[in-house]
Amino acid sequence: MKNSLSWVIGGPQGSGVDSAANIFSRACAQGGLHLFGKREYYSNIKGDHSYFTVRVAENPVNSHLDEINILVTFDAETVFRHAHKVAKGGAIIYDSSLVNISINEVPTIDDQSSIRISDILNTAGYPTTIQGILDFAKSNGCVVYGLPYFEMIEDLARGLNDPSLSKLTRMVNVIALSSSLALLKFDKKQLIKAIQTVFQTKPKVLGNNIAAAEYAYSYIGKKYDIAQFNYMLEPRPPLKEYLLVQGNQASAMGKIIGGCRFQTYYPITPASDDSEFLEANQIFDLTSGAKGSIVVVQTEDEIAAITMAISAALTGVRSATATSGPGFSLMAEALGWAGMNEVPVVITLYQRTGPSTGLPTRHEQSDLLFAIHAGHGEFPRIVFASGDIEEAFYDSIKVFNLAEKYQLPVIHMLDKALANSIKTCKKFDQHKVAIERGDLISKVDENLSTRSGGHYLRFRLSDNPVSTRVPLGTENAIFWNTGDEHTEEGHITEDPDLRNKMVSKRMNKLEKALSEIPIEDKLVCFEFGKSTGDITVVSWGSTKGAIIEAMEMLARRGKGIRFIQLRLLHPFPTFEMMNLLKNTRLLIDIEMNYTSQLGSLIKQHTGSDIDYRIVKFNGRPMSTSEVYYAVSAILDGTSQKRIVLEHGT
Amino acid sequence: MALKLAEYKTTVHNDWCAGCGDFGILNAIQMALHEMQIPRHRAVIFSGIGCSGKTPHFINTYGVHTLHGRVLPFAQGAKLANPDLEIIALGGDGDGLGIGAGHFVGAGRKNVDIPYILFNNAVYGLTKGQASPTLKLGMKTKSLSQPNSNSSVNPISLALVAGYTFIARSYSYDVRHLRDVIIKAIQHKGLAYVDVLQPCPTYNDINTREWFQGQDNIDQESGHQVPRIYKIEDRGYDGVVHNTNELGNKMAQVLDIANEWGSKIPIGIFYQNEFVPTYHERISQHISDYATNPPAKQPLCTTEGVPLADISKLLSALRIDN
């Protein structure tokens, strides 16, 4: 099997899993291969199990698979947790000094996992040791490669005449990963180049890591007959104009090009990376050759984060805050203030598993209805969801345009799976980006017609629900803001007639937005096979990649399917959806939550019933394999009406 | 042409109770703006929620009436985005020391260059007289069914330990003193806290105007009533930190005088320390042109909407074919 595989590397948090995966990914991408990688980790600083899955292919990939072809492990826990999931013909690379360890000796394996894994081994008749699970994997058709990591490091240290190296257990990651690339007969030059790139900021350890990589690369070939191994990675022509990029980087870069100049945040997983990227790149180039900058403020809590972002927006700045569910819960009241005062502010909402603290480092899409309804009372907002890393970049500019055109808060829905995945992706085209600031003016004539009674009418009532906006500090344009119902100038009123007019003014902006937002920003309709629309799959957000790949597999089996990816979730594109669902006789909703939240919205707005619901809420993103098998079962008529996906480690 | 005092006033109907201490504070703010001749469009008054929250509507400058407890982050956000704005934050005692106490402390750590005026009458007026965080333990103001079971917070001490670099107190019926304190707070380089003692004629029947005037505070020897309020400057108090060596003493002095209450209540400038860098100065350490090119001054795009930022270097760093 050449150039198509699923590679997993795992070890304790803090042992270099990420940098090993990063080196592997860079090496593959430099070698002209496409990849999609995802990171899974506990809410823990050091010691708990963390792993990284990288799927490599010759064509672009957007999701992971359940099957593992190459499992690279540093420790016993990774072997116990993943070895039985390695597919036939696959390989396991492990520390040969660990074979006698029993599952009960690994303190970080929780009881539930321990019982589950032990049951599998007991049923198959193998002891619950590393040797037992490796023998079980061999009985499944896997090849296992034991490497004495610490002996290797000692031997390397002797060879380099540097005894201090022998204590460098941190190099296990590079040894394990390099062995896997040797096993895959991948070009060593690309491996070394990737190490140089990843460690370029750490010149002290660069040399040792290269030496370790070279050593491990040749070691495994001496100990095992790796020519027999089936899988291989062979460099392809370079990927021209491609990036290797993570979701949170995409969103943050979109903010810079899209004109965001003020961002606030309170630390929270998985949203902090967005703000930290901006802070690390707070000074950036301008096309003029001068420099621009973004102010990033860490606040005392999320209430301060959103209120600061709102008031920065009042000064005419494109302003945002990035958070996750618990933080967004705290922002609900201020969100209403922004709606009431027609303030364009962007909330980048990286969803994670809820409720409460939930699984703080895991994935879910369960904040859709909350984003649409957060806050008391009725006010307009836009809820917009990106489906992949590329969309996250371009959408983070669009959401500012929407916020300013309609003068309202916009919630940009992203999630943990998007934030922490990495992929080879066509280079973002910053020349495709356009900034639309809506009805924002910076100068007001002393006699401007919007003035009445001597004051500027910030909330002027007219046929257009969007009034002209001026930044605080503008001459001749003094206005007031208040969370109370207000007059056109912004003073408090309790007049019933004015109340009616102001509520209608604000809410009418949603109709205006619906009539102006282009269809491709509302939803994207993908047709697979000979689709007539009679079988339709609906979803939103980061399930996109897995669904598209699963639909392509089904199309190859002769199935015709339509997939509608919803992007504008609020206001809901009812007209377009009803049109697309006209001929649908089988409607399947796929979402990462318990209650099929998009399904409820579709029923509410279009009247269409969801026939089958595929849901997942165990904190691990959906795979192509899971979607494929679930939809296959529906099409084969062997499925329940509601399918709960359960895969994940 | 000089702006007249009347030009800082709006014609909005004022619905505060007759005799409310808020009027004195409102007048003092308007007088301070007038005295400093701050252009009306450059001033923004931020308020929280409650009777005090309505204040911006009576001042003819930009006014932002925010959320309960959140006036400080609102005010800081605008000042950080556009440091040229003259921002005044104000709010009530429940607003700033109850629901907003986290922001009260958070703001102290940042030292953003704004004054914060706290209307301190020890009750929640607009919700009909519940005990506020500054009502003393055991006090039973008239709408309480039981004496207050919470200890009071001392905002002067809290401001000091939270890091405020200007701390003063004034009294709403001494409008000239209050005006002068507000001017000094606006002029101060950093975050300035102004505690304003004020009666609530409707709900606080203990700390009344007469109580502050000392109606029941009789000097044993002369038999005259002695006003409770006294000016610390008159007694030679100097709260200014002139050099950093005297920081400890100056801070200790604040804690000492902040505890005075009962028969004598100090007002004046308790503390001023301009040696602490403002948040603007802190940002300027890493964004060197922040003072002249803050977020609000940066053009984002051409008139055709073409972005002015260029992220090609960021993109290059992520390219795999280089």
Image (cartoon, rainbow, N blue to C red):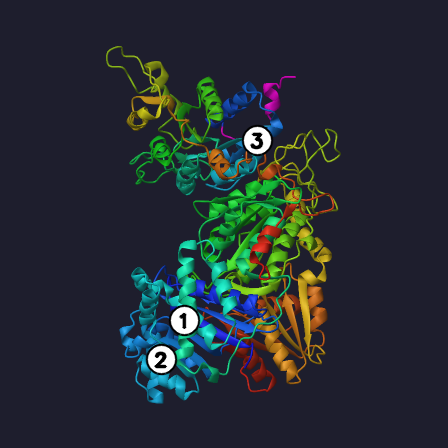
Disc 2 from disc 3: Cα separation = 64 Å
Q: Amino acid at mark 2?
A: Ile
Mark 3–mark 1 distance (CA, rounded to whole Å): 61 Å
Picture quarter containing residue A387? bottom right
Residue at 28% x, 78% y is A102
Q: Position of residue A544 (x, y in %)?
A: 59, 69
Name the amino acid, label 1: Ala
Say few, some or many: other residues with alpha carbon within 10 Å of mark 1 (under 14 / 14 to 19 / 20 or more): many
Asked if B29 appears above or below B287 in the picture, the reply is above
Along the polypeptide, which appears first: circle 2 or circle 1?
Answer: 2
Q: Which of A345/A610 is in front?
A: A345
Q: Secondary structure at mark 3?
A: loop
Label 3 is placed on what type of residue?
Asp
What residue did someone put label 3 on? B84
Q: Quadrant of the C terminus of chain A?
A: bottom left
Residue A262's x, y, as percent? 55, 44
Query: Is B94 left, or right, of A56 in this rendering?
Result: left
Q: Is residue A60 above or below residue B8?
A: below
Do the numbered discs 2 and 1 sit on residues whose CB atoms are within 8 Å?
no
List the residue tagged with mark 1.
A216
**Of the pair A262 and B205, the residue shown nearer to us:** A262
- Look at the image and give the residue range highlighted in magenta: B1-17
Q: On what subunit does the disc labeled 2 rest?
A: A
Front: mark 2 or 1: 1
Question: Does residue B179 sit above or below A61 in this rendering?
Answer: above
What's the residue at 65%, 43% (across, down)?
A: B300
Label 2 neighbour load within 10 Å: few <14, some 14-19, many 20+: some
Asked if disc 3 and disc 1 are in contact, CB closer than 8 Å, the reply is no
Residue A410 visible from this viewpoint: no
* Residue position for label 2: A117
Residues at marks 2 and 1 on the same chain = yes
